[in-house]
Amino acid sequence: MHLYTFASGSSGNCALVTMGSTAVLLDAGISARRITRALAELDLTPDRLSAIVVTHEHADHVAGLAVLTKRCSVPVFASAGTARELARMTPRLEDLLRPFHAGDSFCLGDLALTSFSTPHDAADSVGYTVTDGRRTLGLITDLGCVTENIRAAARTCDTLILESNHDIDRLRLGPYPDWLKRRILSDRGHLCNEAAAALAQEAVEHGTERILLAHLSEKNNTEALARDAAAAALRGTGVSPRLIPRSACAPAVEV
Ligand SMILES: [Zn+2]
Ligand SMILES: [Zn+2]
């Protein structure tokens, strides 16, 4: 199973996971043109996608969805609440939507996905684990706190994409208005570096081999702060955290 990341952060999130001829797009939060270009680099076209799987309806996760699905009729998997929001935003999507209940599992070609609820200020946000039966990838971003089901999912992953959104002091002292600071810091906001580091440590103790830090805030974090927090928590484990580039395609990761 291979993972390709195209973008990560509040200006857009999009990744691709492939196994044999199965290709699943995880979120479509950059323009359809950028997604198409990134797929072309991998000798893929949008109509070759097995499915598009969405975490939630925020623009940084679905901005390219409407245009991308105009040109190809790829099924779009989303939790029931997210699907409702997507259909409200783009009625034409209704035919392509494959709603499921948060917590459900489903198969897409050679891959099996399991969803789990994430605490976030969206209708019905979820994270995913993706497995080829041998190895497992986890996608855990856009969450205000770590719940027991998220912990359980993280422990099963060989490779974990994990939100490390902000440094709490930087956010508190930074330029954001107070209401937005409160929103980000809340249990339905975004995950701080310390909480991400703690979850990374727990996952690695249970066998996770690769930690990919994602969804870093441009204003309230730095790559060094996120990496140092996770590296400190992982000291002695032999695992070094890596960062997913904000707006560039990263080399393939073999999960
Ligand atoms: Zn987001
Ligand atoms: Zn979000």
Image: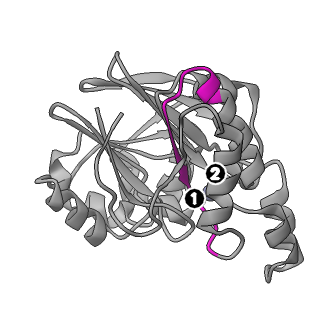
Disc 2 beta carbon < 8 A from ligand 2?
Answer: yes
134 horizontally vs 210: left or right: left
Residue at 64%, 23% in the rendered image: 205
Mark 2 is surrounded, within 10 Å at the Cα level, by few (under 14), some (14 to 19) or many (20 or more) other residues, namely many
Give the magenta range: 203-218
Quadrant assignment for ligand 1:
bottom right
Marking on residue 215: 1
Q: Secondary structure at mark 1?
A: loop
Q: Amino acid at mark 1?
A: His
Q: Position of residue 193 (x, y in %)?
A: 72, 53
Report if residue 213 is visible in the image: yes
Disc 1 beta carbon < 8 A from ligand 1?
Answer: yes
Mark 1 is surrounded, within 10 Å at the Cα level, by few (under 14), some (14 to 19) or many (20 or more) other residues, namely many
Q: Which residue is mark 2?
A: 142
- Tags 2 and 1 touching, CB below 8 Å: yes
Report if residue 119 is visible in the image: no
Q: Residue furthest bottom?
A: 175
Tag count? 2
Q: Secondary structure at mark 2?
A: loop
Q: Position of residue 254 (x, y in %)?
A: 31, 37
72 horizontally vs 182: left or right: left
> Which sits earlier in the primary sequence, circle 2 or circle 1?
2
